[in-house]
Amino acid sequence: MREITFAEAIREALREEMHRDPSVFIMGEDVGVFGGVFGVTAGLYEEFGPDRVRDTPISESAIVGGGLGAAMMGMRPVVEIMFGDFLMCAGDQIVNQAAKARYMSGGKAKVPLTIRVTTGAPGSAAAQHSQSPESWFMNVPGLKIAVPATPADAKGLLKTAIRGEDPVLFFEHKMLYAVRGPVPEDPDFTVPFGEANVVRPGRDVTIIAIGGMLAKALAAADALAQEGIEAEVIDPRTLVPLDKETLIRSLAKTGRVVIVHEAHKRAGPGAEIAAVLAEEAVEYLDGPIVRVAAKNVPIPYSPVLEEEVLPGAEDILAAVRFLTAGAKA
């Protein structure tokens, strides 16, 4: 299978869906002539023109609000928020309007709105451009949340989002844009929401890795294998809906679980996943549920301090060794 980058996979999904459905259009800051600040939409303006690839002013509220209105009138907008740190500027549009429109209209108003959002620390971008805000919106009924970790999932999940009837927050880690991987060329290739991917099978511990942390979890699993510890690594792919069945099935096999994400530890995605496992699968636990996440401070500009705050493979190794050592004791 050919290999392309994460960014190219997203662009390919956008191009294919725009060819397939004339109601699909793109809107956001610098997505048109400039091709996106990370180059994801490069070439689409030239191919589809200004009516379907629209540059907007710097106003997250206007971008999401315009997309919401278009979606309720029968279009399928894909809007881009350049930095997820500023999603709260469109908080009312997302939380009080887009998420609730279908429910409050008795199902008459569909909201096929995809909100593409960059997430994570790209390296010394400091506290206002490095956050991972996925869990801010996990508390809001009516929103779906996708967090792809591979180029194939980026393409497949985005096409599922665009073809759906509900608002989706689609989080793209900035450090994944240049990552290459195999991606199907089938224009109807999709990845369903709510189906986690068991990326690496194992028997001793379950590592649930979200978004950009998947590669670090796999690196840790390789190192653990040298110590005789076989870690099962699972990528949830979507946080809402969450594939509880796959996570619980793995926990029943291994008895131990480490949840890894780049968002801050306090009330991050791992807190919700840990609560679900504690409520529904406590009988399988042979030790505490351990979370590996960013420390509860703003992300620093200093590269040294940033590395200290963000979780890495060594932190995952330490968590697994703690759990397995406890089991032996």
Image (cartoon, helix red, strand yellow):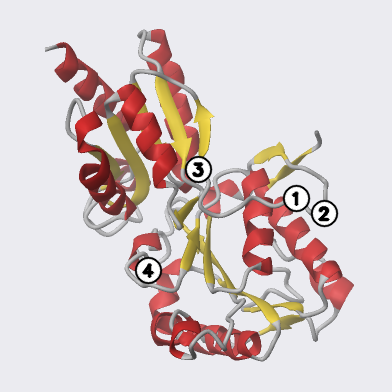
Give the number of the disc on residue 189. 1
Q: Mark 2 belongs to which amino acid?
A: Pro
Q: Nearer the viewer, mark 4 or mark 3?
A: 3
Q: Earlier in the sequence, mark 1 or mark 4?
A: 4
Q: Quadrant of the C terminus?
A: top left
Is residue 209 among what the camera can see?
Answer: no
What residue appears at the point 69 percent right and 60 percent down from the top-left corner? 159
Q: Is residue 210 left or right of residue 297?
A: right
Q: Is residue 261 left or right of residue 40?
A: left
Distance from Cα at disc 1 to Cα at disc 2: 6 Å
Direction front: furthest residue: 106
Q: Secondary structure at mark 2?
A: loop
Distance from Cα at disc 2 to Cα at disc 3: 22 Å
Distance from Cα at disc 3 to Cα at disc 1: 17 Å
Q: Are marks 1 and 2 in contact (CB under 8 Å)?
A: yes
Q: Earlier in the sequence, mark 4 or mark 2?
A: 4
* Picture layout, residue 54 above or below residue 210: below
Q: Mark 3 belongs to which amino acid?
A: Ala
Direction left: furthest residue: 329
Question: Which quadrant of the view contains residue 55?
Answer: bottom right
Q: Which residue is tagged 3?
A: 196
What residue appears at the point 33 percent right and 31 percent down from the top-left corner? 251
Q: Secondary structure at mark 1?
A: loop
Give the number of the disc on residue 187. 2
Distance from Cα at disc 4 to Cα at disc 2: 30 Å
